[in-house]
Image (tube, rainbow, N blue to C red):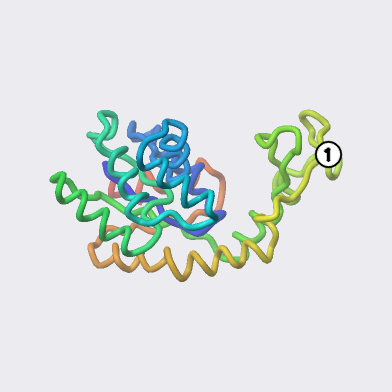
Amino acid sequence: MRIVLVGPPGAGKGTQAAYLAKNLAIPHISTGDLFRANISQGTDLGKKAKAFMDAGELVPDEVTIGMARDRMNQPDAIGGFLLDGFPRNVSQAEALDEALKEDGVTLDAVLDLEVPEEEVVKRIAGRRICRNDSSHVFHVSYSAPKQEGVCDVCGGELYQRDDDSEATVRKRLEVYHTQTEPIIDYYKAQDLVVTIPALGKVEEVTERAMAALQGGE
């Protein structure tokens, strides 16, 4: 299956993408991983992306699309893939359609993870990261440390990242509504969108998504 995963920041796209890709036996292709791989490998596209990033500028669509297309054409993705974080806007969605058309394939579904805006703010703004190890993540409401401000695992200081502040989260949501959300209407016109309520346990959301992909509820 060829799937695009969309949803606001904090909807759990990365987590769901990993679960779904495993269940469907297809590669999970995230924009972040594409950038890291191309930059670390020193590809032409990676060098171009790094130049823009170092200058504090957005990487142009054509560079991102080039990376995505290269990845989608690798052997493990021939039978399908799950795109996470791409496309980010309608122009990227149109370019993706064109690239897939040239390769003689089409998307099977666009999964839209639906989360109320205030829940998004609560999820992200409540996140706390360990200064010693960023893989140690807590949440003031959902997975609070035993001692406030102290990592249960290593005793390191817990802090809130600048981009996790409520003000920043709301700005990120504005960008999502303006730039990314329009792709949902774009794909609805192709009858590809499946809306998945993304509240609840991770496993429950995954089950809903799998049932929707299999044509059930």
Q: Does dot 1 land on a helix, a strand or a loop? A: loop
In the rendered image, the quadrant that contains the N terminus is top left
How far across and down, in percent of the image, does residue 165 sit?
A: 70, 59
Q: Position of residue 66 (x, y in %)?
A: 30, 46
Instruction: Bin the neighbour count of mark 1 within 10 Å (Cα to Cα): few under 14, some 14-19, many 20 and up.
Output: many
Q: Is residue 81 above or below residue 181?
A: above
Quadrant of residue 67 in the image? top left
Q: Is residue 179 above or below residue 27?
A: below
Relative horizontal placement of residue 76, taking residue 47 as reference (left or right): left
> What residue is rendered at 36% in x and 55% in y?
87
Residue at mark 1:
150
Side of 60 relative to 147 (left or right)? left
In the picture as drawn, the residue positioned furthest to the right comes out as 147
| Relative height, residue 198 to residue 22 (above, below) | below
Q: Amino acid at mark 1?
A: Val
Q: How many marks?
A: 1
Q: What residue do we see at 48% from left, 48% from top?
A: 13
Q: Residue at x 74, y 50 (%)?
A: 160
Q: Nearer the viewer, residue 33 or 81?
A: 33
